[in-house]
């Protein structure tokens, strides 16, 4: 496939059964054909080269996140619990456009100015949910921002149960970086390309302690 290409593919599996017993012969062969495959070369590997992969496009993959990044997981659990999407019936959708991702991130977590200054806590960085790399991210969510104080230390936002919107929390910086890498790996391994749906399975998390 050419770089940055997407195409439907048919997969055929030919099979037969053998047996070591001398009085039993092999079965006849048969073929299963699937017309549900999608292949693409839209994701780069660690060397910066476009890498081909194929998936069953009708399957919605699940991003699992747990106690090893407990504060990130806790924020996701709280955000989904407050009404935001991410469960199987209300999945997120991948946003691959870099400009849209940056706008989502700047909306939820501005890098400078009075909002950013008031949120600062040593050892923490700003985490947003839904992820900036989703079409449900802050700038396009169509709803208000929310947080979970005092744990999250986001004085400019209050609580909300709106099913639209986004959530912000100041969490452990190392966990924030690690979880971002986990999400990128998930996108690549599961071939989650632009506008693909995906669900979240967040377990074992806890919100950060109040600063």
Image (cartoon, rainbow, N blue to C red):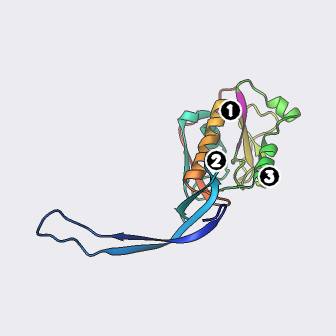
Relative to the observer, which residue lies in front, 181 or 9? Answer: 9
- The residue pinned by badge 3 equals 99
Q: Earlier in the sequence, mark 2 or mark 3?
A: 2
SS at circle 3: helix
Q: On the picture, is 119 further left or further right than 34? A: right
100 relative to 179, above or below: below
Residue at 54 percent of width and 34 percent of height: 68
In the picture, the quarter occupied by the C terminus is: top right
Relative to the observer, which residue lies in front, 134 or 34? Answer: 34
Q: Main secondary structure of the magenta part?
A: strand
Q: Earlier in the sequence, mark 1 or mark 2?
A: 2
Q: Which residues are magenta?
A: 124-128
* The label number, if any, that marks residue 80 in the structure image: 2
Q: CA distance from mark 2 to mark 3?
A: 25 Å
Q: Mark 1, mark 2: which one is toward the viewer?
A: 1
SS at circle 2: helix
Residue at 13 percent of width and 64 percent of height: 21
Q: Whole-percent x and y of residue 208?
A: 65, 30
Does the rendering let one see residue 149?
Answer: no
Q: Whole-percent x and y of residue 205?
A: 57, 36
Does the rendering let one see residue 43?
Answer: yes
Residue at 66 percent of width and 44 percent of height: 79
- The residue pinned by badge 1 equals 171
192 relative to 25, above or below: above
């Amino acid at each position: 496939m050419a770089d940055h290409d997407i195409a439907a593919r048919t997969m055929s599996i030919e099979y037969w059964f053998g047996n070591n017993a001398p009085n039993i012969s092999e079965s006849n062969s048969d073929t299963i054909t699937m017309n549900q495959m999608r292949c693409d070369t839209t994701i780069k590997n660690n060397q910066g080269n476009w890498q081909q992969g194929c998936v069953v496009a009708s399957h919605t993959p699940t991003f699992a996140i747990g106690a090893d990044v407990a504060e990130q997981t806790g924020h996701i659990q709280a955000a989904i619990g407050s009404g935001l999407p991410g469960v199987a019936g209300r999945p997120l959708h991948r946003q691959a456009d870099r400009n849209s991702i940056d706008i989502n991130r700047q909306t939820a977590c501005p890098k400078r100015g009075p909002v950013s200054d008031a949120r600062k806590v040593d050892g923490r960085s700003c985490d947003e949910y839904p992820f900036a790399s989703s079409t449900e991210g802050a700038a396009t969510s169509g709803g208000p921002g929310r947080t979970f104080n005092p744990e999250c230390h986001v004085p400019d936002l209050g609580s909300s149960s709106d099913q639209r919107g986004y959530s912000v929390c100041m969490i452990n910086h190392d966990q924030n970086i690690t979880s971002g890498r986990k999400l990128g790996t998930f996108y690549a391994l599961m071939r989650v390309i632009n506008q693909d749906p995906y669900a979240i399975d967040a377990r074992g998390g806890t919100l950060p302690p109040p600063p």
